[in-house]
Amino acid sequence: MSVTVRRTHALSLVGLACLAMGRGLPEAAGGVPWAGECVEQLWTTSMMRSRIPGPGFILHNSSLILFLLASLLLPLPAGADSIGWSTPRQLAPATAACLQQYGPSPAARDPSLWTLWFEEKDTSLSRSTLKASRFSNGSWSEPESVTSDTADFIFVQTAVDAALNPWAVWSRGRYISPDSGFSFCLWSRRQGDSWTSPELISRDTAGHGGSPSVTSDPVQGIWAIWHKIQDDSVSILSSYCRTDSWAPQAVVARFLWWFVPYVPVITAPSGGKVRSVWTGALPIGIGIYSATWSGDSWEDHELIPEGSLGYWPSVCSDSVGGTWVTWYDGFSGDSGLIRCAHHDGTGWTETWRLATGNVSVYRGMLCCDEQGWIWALWVQPHGTADGPDICVRYFDGDSWSDRSVVATPARMIICPRIAAALGRVWVTWTQCESDDRWLLYYSHTLPAGIAGHERQRLAAVRVSPSVVRAGTAIRLSGLQPGQTVQLLDATGRKVELRTRDLCTSLLSPGVYFVRISGRGQPVSHKVLVVQ
């Protein structure tokens, strides 16, 4: 199985490389200004403001000059972590000398948080079991078996439905020959205290397929998407399940399979159309594609902006019906980019470069929390003896944060995954303690870190003037999405509510408070209204 998978991925990358030779390499990675440029700007500003030219400038600005000289010798910081992360812990502690836990797939719908993974106790047999654990009452539950069968499992994906039941879809390998089919997709869901018997999503066994992805939809229930290779082409297929019956599979797209890494993903925006995302080679070009479900077929096939030559997409929906996609753009080495695009339900609105250099991203590395913040995850080696950094940035509705490092595992294998639940963001990964011991680890955001960041956002809102004549508006600046404003009198009674300017024409003289609320503790500003 593993030989065939590596062969498929290798052919995919070769195809991408051949196409790229005629189209040029991706745009150069951006960077921060050099220290010398910063020094030049500060020096020019200081000279313009100084009243004493020449030696007098040096005497009156000696501290500034020493600071500037020191800054030339020190690298500029990449941005301090604004969010704290818990110390990494084992998700399913085990003492067996030979044990491999891999492929973690977290899924969440408040207040339910699950993680599924494969577990292999005899690595010589390549036979795994599928395990599951739920986070409840401050800890992860004892692992339970999703299926009693042992097989060559790969690519498990998880979603939680509206009834807070977890669903799992995965590929089961069935190796026949190097040139024939070997994989098909199964599903199971938890009912009560046990999991249903695994069943095929589709009875179509022609060719071979796998790499399923899954999402929860309030209308159609659970959606699954996967690929199938037959002869010289790959088909992206989908189906949905309302109860225990899957709808006939629908073709999302079809193209020559060897050109691209074709792993598809799917999401169901609230109040919007179900959207599929995949890497494909349609007549308009090669890159990251998207399509929407019309009710009986897939339509609006389009190349995502800046998605040319991209692959390994990850997708999630936000709280207002939008879709977010991240993907890898480039080739191995220092020329790679992590890109992100946003669809607001009417069109693609904006794209960003989240990271550059020797980076990697895969599906399951993007999520939306209960406040509507978007969290993007990636892995970035840093060229030292330590392992790679597991990195994250979040979009708070206004801008992207600085990079935050979740952990630096010494020997991480298998890409990490991310999910949001219970007021926190969770990251899981597999860490290799030895060749025979691969263990699951997790970390989550610290509530104090998120609260501290929100306090800074609330404190950044400016209220002026502090003394205002009746009839004059109280001005607000720096108000950000997700923040609300209340005007209270001296007794704490709400007087008036506006989102921007607060009019005082109907207010009696006295003391009032402008309260700014957001994700953390509200911040109040005292204002005196006079005649």
Image: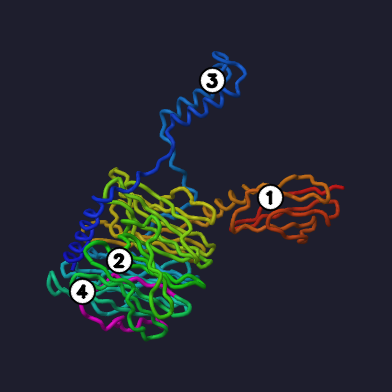
Q: Which residue is labeled 1 in the image?
A: 476
Instruction: State how far apart marks 4 and 2 are (Cα).
Output: 15 Å
Q: Is residue 142 visible?
A: no
Q: Which residue is labeled 3 in the image?
A: 62
Q: Nearer the viewer, residue 162 or 340?
A: 340
Instruction: State how far apart marks 4 and 3 are (Cα).
Output: 73 Å
Q: Nearer the viewer, mark 1 or mark 4?
A: 4
Q: Which residue in the rendered view is the most extreme toward the top?
A: 55
Q: Nearer the viewer, residue 468 or 330?
A: 330
Q: Residue at x 32, y 62 (%)?
A: 284
Looking at marks 1 and 2 on the same chain, the residue that comes earlier in the sequence is marked by 2
Picture quarter containing residue 170? bottom left
Instruction: State how far apart marks 1 and 3 are (Cα).
Output: 39 Å
Q: Which residue is labeled 2 in the image?
A: 263
Q: Decide if residue 412 is on the left or right side of residue 219.
A: left
Amino acid type for the residue under numbered disc 2? Val
